[in-house]
Image (cartoon, rainbow, N blue to C red):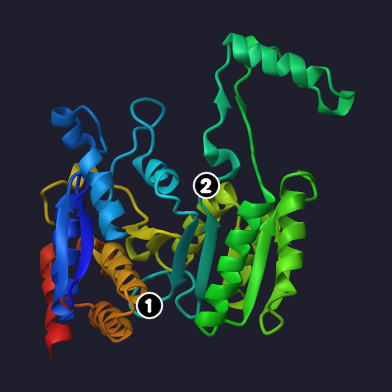
Amino acid sequence: MAHEVTLIKGDGTGPELAEASRKCIDATGVKINWDVQEAGVDIMATKGTPIPDETIASVRRTKCALKAPITTPVGTGFRSINVYLRQELGLFACIRPCKQYQGVRSFFSHLPVDIVIVRENTEDLYAGVEFEAGKPETQQLIDFINGLPADRKIKTAGNETGVSIKPISISGSERIIRCAFQYARDNGRKKVTAVHKANIMKYSDGLYLAVAERVAKDFPDIEFEERIVDNMCMQLAQKPELYDVLVLPNLYGDIISDLGAGIVGGLGVAPGANLGPNGAVFEATHGSAPKYKGLNKVNPTALILSGMLMLKYLKEDDAAQRLEKAVADVIAEGKYVTYDLKDDRNDPTAVGTQEMADAICRRLRG
């Protein structure tokens, strides 16, 4: 019986990465009916929206999507489609494996780094509850805050102060922390580290840490520890091999997951999964690189490995293992890889996006 999966082509280099990933997933032999949908700056020109209703409807129907990169304008334009999809579809958990593969250059190539970052996806500062400087409602909020005890006052006026609200709930914290512990248990992991800034933000991060300590008692087979987020950054820069599963609120998770990707060679090899009670969206963690659009140049590894995570989600474990091994073997061989995976980025033997995908397909087919 075939699986129903939405394929969101994205923009920039997204469509060519989507094609490369699709052919590798199909080469595993798993039967998938792909419902190809659009999102991003290209479709906005014709539809008037970067995320058409039919794309959302497709994901709601299939409950599983592979999404190629989509451009997010900086400072202006539409809001992040990634954030919108997570909130609209209730995808509360972001899973970001950061694994060292032989042949990928990094300062930690000699270490067995294999970290999984579990990031809360819907709360924290990314909830988007913001107040613009100079607006009447912003001044009203500041006036309210300045009516509180002196240690909570805002020292500047509303006409020069933007405000973001950081909501952290008991229920939101509990479900992401349980998700991290359950992931650890299901995948043979030994330790969960809760990352926070509870020493300063005592009523938001403090609540998160208290929930983590309580939930940890329900998983006596999994070691538990906590780390302050700035110390966690230092720890990862010094000894990443000591860490296993990290669970974090939204903003810290976004930052630390990119740090984790950097440790193992960059966003080009970093897959991602966004999970919720009613479905999942799998995506590369890098951007759409519009300057390389149509050049058949960019590394497809991150989206292909996101497809591997998707196969695991669909309970196609054997196919997922074979796909990951094929990717790892091609990278380790170093012959049919894109320019960024060569020792010299100007190496003329580097291949294109589709050619690397074809090499992975050959490995899968024997």
Q: Residue at x 25, y 69 (%)?
A: 342
> Quadrant of the image for the C terminus?
bottom left
Side of 58 relative to 252 (left or right) = left
Q: Is residue 244 visible?
A: no
What kind of residue is marked 2? Thr
**Residue 122: which disc?**
2
> Quadrant of the image for the N terminus?
bottom left
- Callout 1 crowding tier (Cα within 10 Å): few <14, some 14–19, many ≥20: many
Q: CA distance from mark 1 to mark 2?
A: 31 Å
Q: Is residue 238 visible?
A: yes
**Residue 162: which disc?**
none
Q: List x then y, in percent, for residue 281.
A: 34, 57
- Mark 1 = which residue? 101
Q: Secondary structure at mark 1?
A: loop
Which corner quadrant of the image does residue 311 belong to? bottom left
Q: List x then y, in percent, for residue 351.
A: 13, 67
Closer to the camera, 140 or 364?
140
Q: List x then y, in percent, for residue 36.
A: 15, 54
Q: Secondary structure at mark 2?
A: loop
Q: Residue at x 17, y 30 (%)?
A: 47
- Which circle, 1 or 2, is nearer the viewer? 2
Closer to the camera, 124 or 12?
124
Q: Residue at x 57, y 11 (%)?
A: 135
Q: Residue at x 14, y 78 (%)?
A: 27
Precedes in sequence: disc 1 or disc 2 = 1
Q: Image height check: is 196 above or below 140? A: below
Side of 186 relative to 323 (left or right) = right
Label 1 close to label 2 by CB (< 8 Å): no
- Callout 2 crowding tier (Cα within 10 Å): few <14, some 14–19, many ≥20: many
Which corner quadrant of the image does residue 203 belong to? top right
Q: List x then y, in percent, for residue 34.
A: 15, 62
What kind of residue is marked 1? Tyr
